[in-house]
Image: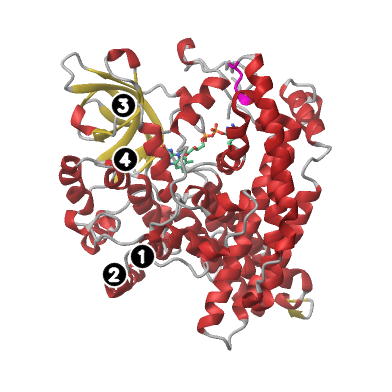
Amino acid sequence: MNSSTIETVRTSNPVLPLEREVSEREARKVAEAAREKEWKLPSFVRELFLGRLRMDLINPLPEPKQDDGERGEDFLRRLEDYLRTVDGDELDRVPGMPAEVHDALSELGAFGMKIPQEFGGLGFSQRTYTRALALCGTHSSTISVTLSAHQSIGVPQPLVLFGTDEQKEKYLPRLAKGAISGFALTETDVGSDPARMQCEAVLSDDGCTYVLNGSKLWCTNAPLAELLVVMARVPGEEGGPGGITAFIVDMATEGVEVTNRCSFMGLPGIENGVVQFKNVSIPVENRLLEEGRGLKLALVTLNTGRLGIPVSCAATGKWCLQVVREWASVRAQWGAPIGKHEAVAHMVATIASETFAMEAVADLGVALADSGKFDIRLEAAMGKLLNSETGWRVVDRTMQVRGGRGYETAESLEARGEAPIPVEQVMRSMRINRIFEGSSEIMRLFIAREAVDPHLRKAGSVADPDSRLDAKVKDAFGLGFHMANWVGRNLVGWSRKPSYRHFGELAGHVAFVDRSARRLARSTALAMAWYGPKLERHQAVLFRLVDIAAELYAMSASCIQAKGKLDIAPEDETPVQLADLFCSQSRQRVDSLFRGLFDATDADAYRLAQGVLDGDYRWLEQGILEPTAPNGINR
Ligand SMILES: Cc1cc2nc3c(=O)[nH]c(=O)nc-3n(C[C@H](O)[C@H](O)[C@H](O)COP(=O)(O)OP(=O)(O)OC[C@H]3O[C@@H](n4cnc5c(N)ncnc54)[C@H](O)[C@@H]3O)c2cc1C
């Protein structure tokens, strides 16, 4: 999005030299340059934002380009058999993957699930791959995160998508055999904002190598990895276009060192570290794509890479459902099993219906990706946002149903002679899904950027802070006409009265999605007309619009999932019951989001937050021991 104001963000961080301090406009420019601007293939979510419910795109679920058939099922069976022989809890308690587990997984081919068969991998579809991750994830998060960091975002994925034939031949067979890899984008000052990147790769005078310096933070698998895909800034003046560029870096190269191992609230078994690069020589042949295209590569990699998280969250939901089903029926308090008390019963019902919806969302994303006929960037982001948020709520409810036993560790439960059900550990590990691979806020910004794109395109110079006043005036007329036309078009849509009777009992919910999609398109245009290009600063409004679209997407996915199951087994109405409850609760959330779209408290909340940051409310912090280190947070 363009910005009409420039606000230089100056931090007190001593790590960032002055020349790399970046203005907000520069940060946006970098993000905008990496954005895919064209839509060559259809997208269900993009259509939703345009006010069009295109059920025909997703119902029935699109066919996969490739069916792994018995080969895939056989692999999943062997993987499951192997997992049953491994003590998952033990594996998740101690950092690192034992050599025998690594060797057994290599033997199975698990490190090459997504690598084409011609390069020694198994060449599975996204569906088989994510089913494998789900199996691993509910048994040992160490195994699933190691495999996922290696294949969803590590070297194989960008190599398959963007590597040259020589690069593929050199590295893919090695990776398929079990050479672990990772993805290194984050730095101390680069979390969600790559414009601040400091890792630098300078082309040598003879043009044969890049010399890499800098450091990467929180790189999953780094302490185990043989190869990393590393993003670094190439200076423009060295004869090339420069910009953020992706490289394959062999961890055995002189000057590469893992200087710290990081540990976290959850995922105790994963290997994650800080990687330091000191004058590391990288052959030019190891550059992926051209200079300056690294961020685009990272974003495209993450588009499919992100499909793993919705599947893992849905799998965790199933685990939770099993836990609460068993516990709420045997645990008796106040003269009845706790599941008979309405408050607990409602939690159980919501866990079931939200798990159903999470699976529907995950399956839809995977089906769209496997068909190869859709642009899935919005659906992948929606799936990541929806399932990481919903999954967190599901785990929280599960802990509530388990009561004190939910909060107690599995070891402690076992020592007292009770079933070692590790709800607290699952909760700790689940939390990161709302942060990594694009935080929920960044997912909402990413989706919102696409939602307002049709209007921004019409806005032309009105949204460009650098354009001349006469051009702005001229384009403002065009924009006004576009807005009026848009709102009108999305008002009259009600007269179409499409029939959704084939959805049976769920038809009313699908009709609601249809009406709400048009209301969403009108509201988006209204917000754009009201705030103009400054809408980008009103994240509360934008995020509500995105959350409405996310609910509509989840409802659509749930209705299709239920209909698909009903078509196969008409006598079983349970999928319809689950979808019905999810949709009814989702409709309440949508109504409330529309009602509060332009919430009157937004400005007050923002003002108050600035007061907090300025220290106006420090009196409220008195009476406790300070949580920060003596030198403050920004040591
Ligand atoms: C266990 C773990 C594993 C990881 N693995 C990897 C890995 O393998 N490779 C890798 O490169 N990175 C990895 N990361 C890093 C991870 O991707 C980042 O933590 C994530 O991108 C967020 O960056 P940050 O933590 O610096 O948060 P920040 O970017 O500092 O954000 C802090 C908060 O501000 C919000 N925020 C930031 N910008 C905006 C904005 N413009 N508008 C609204 N809200 C905003 C964020 O959503 C967040 O809530 C890992 C992190 C962890 C904890």
Residue at the image position 43 percent from the left and 24 percent from the top: 197
Query: Residue 619 lies in what quarter of the image?
Result: top right
Q: CA distance from mark 4 to mark 1?
A: 28 Å
Q: Nearer the viewer, mark 3 or mark 4?
A: 3
Label drawn at residue 71: none
Badge nearest the viewer, 2 or 1: 1
Q: Is residue 53 above or below residue 337?
A: above
Q: Secondary structure at mark 4?
A: loop
Cα distance between the residues tagged 3 and 2:
39 Å
Q: What separation in Å lies between label 3 and label 1 (alpha carbons)?
A: 34 Å
Residue 526 seen from this side: yes
Question: Who comes first in sequence, dot 4 or dot 1?
Answer: 1
Q: Which residue is mark 2?
A: 75
Magenta segment: 463-467
Of the image marks 2 and 4, the number of the one nearer the N terminus:
2
Q: Which residue is mark 1?
A: 128
Q: Which three-letter amino acid code belongs to the residue tagged 2?
A: Phe
Give the number of the disc on residue 291: 3
Q: Residue most toward the right?
A: 600
CB under 8 Å between discs 2 and 1: yes
Nearer mark to the viewer, of 4 and 1: 1
Residue 425, x across and y down, in percent: 53, 56
**Residue 35 highlighted magenta (yes or no):** no
